[in-house]
């Protein structure tokens, strides 16, 4: 189960609203959503949570680049919403590296041979394969493959928190405090911001 909320800072305090992510497909979409809610280019926080798994924070300050924190990258990688936050830059990958890997994999058969290998073409097909083939290329376990919904391999993403630990430091939530937060962290974040009442009104 997912929950998303948006907190926008104004001259009179914080305004809160629940947020639908059905039309959000990219980080740019999410950033645009936050900027549209900004008052006089002030701070906007978008909070996304998957119950008992992970939470993420996107912070937008005017036209500045968005700042991101994710409590558990490997858990978020299994989520389509988490994938929005786990950018190549955040993961320390070259932009487009995932697409290049996918393209290379398409050039290779499941048994590890390149398309058009004459030796493979001449070899008679066997429904089950030989014992040696099965030992060399055991069937993939569903849990070890890339997530079918996101196309992201959770094993290739580091476990644990990732992103900017000081994302809320100026609001009184230190790096250490942030690392101690678990799911349903929004309540504690709202308390620190002084936005608990306005948040409660939309939950």
Image: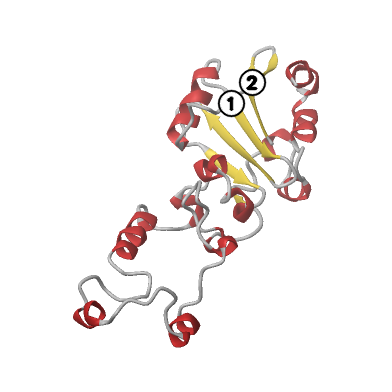
Residue at the image position 45 percent from the left and 51 percent from the top: 89
Dot 1 surroundings within 10 Å: few (below 14), some, or many (20 or more)? some
Q: Secondary structure at mark 1?
A: strand
Q: Is residue 96 above or below residue 117?
A: above
Residue denoted by label 2: 9
Tell which of 188 and 177 is nearer to you.
188
**Where residue 100 appears, x then y in whole percent?**
32, 59
Q: Which residue is mark 1?
A: 43
Instruction: Indicate the quadrant where residue 193 lies.
Output: top right
**3 or 7: which is nearer to us?**
3
Give the farthest residue toward the bottom: 132
* Pick the front one: 138 or 123: 123
The C terminus lies in which quarter of the figure?
top right
| Earlier residue among tags 1 and 2 | 2
Q: Considering the image in quadrants, where does the N terminus appear?
A: top right
Structural distance between the alpha carbons of marks 1 and 2:
6 Å
In the image, residue 92 above or below residue 188: below
Q: Is residue 132 left or right of residue 154?
A: left
């Amino acid at each position: 189960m997912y929950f998303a909320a948006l907190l926008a800072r104004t001259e009179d305090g914080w305004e809160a609203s629940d947020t639908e992510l059905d039309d959000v497909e990219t980080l740019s979409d999410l950033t645009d959503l936050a900027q549209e809610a900004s008052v006089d280019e002030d701070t906007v926080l978008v909070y996304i949570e998957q119950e008992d798994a992970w939470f993420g924070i996107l912070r937008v300050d005017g036209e500045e680049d968005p700042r991101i924190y994710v409590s558990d990258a490997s858990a978020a990688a299994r989520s389509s919403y988490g994938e929005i936050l786990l950018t190549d830059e955040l993961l320390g990958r070259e932009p487009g590296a995932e697409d290049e890997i996918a393209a290379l994999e398409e050039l290779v058969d499941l048994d590890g041979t390149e398309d058009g290998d004459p030796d493979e073409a001449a070899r008679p097909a066997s429904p089950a394969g030989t014992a040696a083939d099965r030992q060399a290329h055991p069937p993939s376990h569903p849990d070890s493959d890339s997530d079918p919904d996101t196309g992201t391999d959770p094993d290739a993403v580091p476990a644990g928190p990732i992103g900017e630990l000081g994302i809320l430091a100026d609001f009184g939530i230190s790096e250490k405090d942030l690392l101690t937060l678990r799911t349903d962290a929004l309540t504690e974040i709202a308390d620190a911001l002084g936005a608990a009442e306005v948040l409660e009104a939309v939950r």
